[in-house]
Amino acid sequence: MALAAVGRSLFRYRSELAPITVAAALGIAGLVLHQTHPDAWPLVAALTAIAAAAAGLRGLPWGALRAEERTYAATATAVAGGWLTAATALGPAKTPLPTVLIIALVALGVPWWAHRRRRARVRVDRVIHAWPDLADTIGLDGSRIMSAIVDTWGWRARMKLRPGQSVADVVARVPAIESALGTRPGAVRVEQDAAHAGRCTMRVLAVDPHAGAIPWPGPSARSLADPIELGVFEDATTVRVPLLRRHALIGGTTDSGKSGVLNVILGNLAACADVVLWGIDLKGGMELRPWAPCLARLATTPDEAVELLADAVAILDARANASSRDNTRVWEPTPRTPALGIVIDEYAELADTAPAAIPYADSVARRGRAVAVDLIAATQRPTQKAMGGGTLRSQMSVRVCLRVRERRDVDLILDKGMLSAGWHAHALDAPGKFYVLADGHNQPRRARAYLVTDEHVRGTAARFADHRPDLDPLSRSAIDQQPRALEPQARAADDPDHALSTALDQAPDDGLSIPELINVTGMRRTWIYDRLQALAATGRARQVTRGRWRA
């Protein structure tokens, strides 16, 4: 029993005893070689030189280590091999070899004992050994850690769950796991294993890799087909999001970093020669005006926003008709036939002050992707009123969720059930930290957006202002032919019935659409439909084609 106890102690502290073990192994090896092959010292010296050189190389499997660590490995190898060479030729007891071995043990042992990565590895090994007892305590009995890896920021482990347990059970017990492991709050991350429902990856962050801002390296895209780099995940991999034929929604509370994410996107789109950029900023242009040199149009009033979105729908219709005639399913963006990207800063403000613009935005959201008319909407108020209704929210295939005030806002921005699945955006603790839900990003991985300074904005806008594309002739013609029965003086808000009759009388041969009639009258869609049916029953209005009316 005493021997077993000593053996267990030696195994438990095997990492701390490694320098002593190596020194003892060198002494024994030197004694054996001196007695059996004393003339082999040149071979030992040659092997030492090769091993020391290999230990310092960057391209080998251990080349991912830092330069200081590779230098330590090469030095330790050279000292150990040199001592073994001398011991082979002279004998390990020859003065001063015992003294040199002790001095080398202490000199090379201190960095080993103090090294952060080694100590972290020891802690992880002990967590793995104690996990069965910890799992019983926190309600994950039967789960086990299969393997663990120490990295720059902490460690990560692959877990196998007991049959009947799921990742949702682990996510629900994250606070208990943090308490059992003795970590700081918010240090544990849980990710689903894509290959097995009963397995997951648990990451424990000893330090927050996103504690400081990450400077923007500059545009990473030169075409809309290139994924845009938004920031960096906690494992140092880049957040790459495709935007071609995709609508994007950026949501977060005040001071969450929404403008920073929007600037990263605009900085990349400004460098793309196959997309025309339009902007809507109803806060007087304070957010988007710095990008004005790269924006073909910027709407800063409700009337301008309605007109801009109406023109976007006209472009959409023209491109759809052209694709139908040419028997092509999608519009391929090129510098001559660019895509159209519409950036809306504070979508909730648009919904409040320009309700007539919402039907146009919904139309673009429903039908715009195939013809490369894309929306990028941002909001600081992810309320049910602003985001819960309409078509736009359901069509957003790229969603960026920054910090939110209430838990329910996570489901409003991302999707129903995301909060319970581990997308805890309410726990984000710094501006610019976010979750992204998009193609290839289906796990709740925290990221931090690049920091785009005012100097970055001015420099990027000036650099690419002269290289921005123009709309193709088909799209320009669609705007020119857009019916202009929507002038402000025609909007008789005090008499919507008269405004509706006037608009129908002045409508072109192909009629006016429902969104255009909503814009003229300022009334809701249901009111428009009721009045049109009443006018049609008396013969005063008729439906020219599906969704288009005239007197």
Image: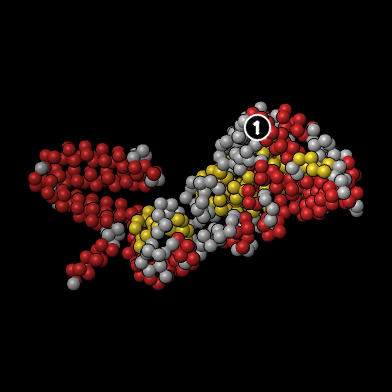
> Which residue appears at 79% of the width and 43% of the height?
543
| Left or right, 350 with reference to 202 | right
Colouring rule applied to residues: secondary structure
The one nearer the camera, 493 or 530, is 530
SS for tag 1?
A: helix
328, 118: nearer the viewer: 328
Q: Nearer the viewer, residue 470 or 316?
A: 316
At a point 17% along the width and 38% down the height, the residue shown is 43
Instruction: Pick the quarter of the image with the N terminus.
Output: bottom left
**Left or right relative to 468: residue 421:** left
Q: Can see residue 148? A: yes
Quarter occupied by residue 271:
top right
In percent of width and height, residue 61 lies at 34, 42
Number of marks drawn: 1
> Residue at the location (40% across, 57% down)?
199
Query: Where is residue 298 shown, x and y percent of the image?
Result: 76, 41
Q: Does the image show residue 303?
A: no
The disc labelled 1 sits on which kind of residue?
Ser
Q: Position of residue 272 (x, y in %)?
A: 62, 34
Kindly give the residue lying farthest to the left in the view shown: 36
Which quarter of the image is occupied by the C terminus? top right
Of 319 and 432, the residue lying toward us: 319
- The quadrant where residue 310 appears: top right
Q: Is residue 102 above or below residue 332?
A: below
The vertical placement of 415 against 543, above or below, is below
Q: Height in image: 160 above or below 54?
A: below
Q: Which residue is mark 1?
A: 323
Q: Percent x, y for residue 446? A: 53, 54
Q: Residue at x 56, y 60 (%)?
A: 417
Instruction: Please tell me how crowded label 1 is: few (under 14), some (14-19), or many (20+) other residues with Cα within 10 Å.
Output: some
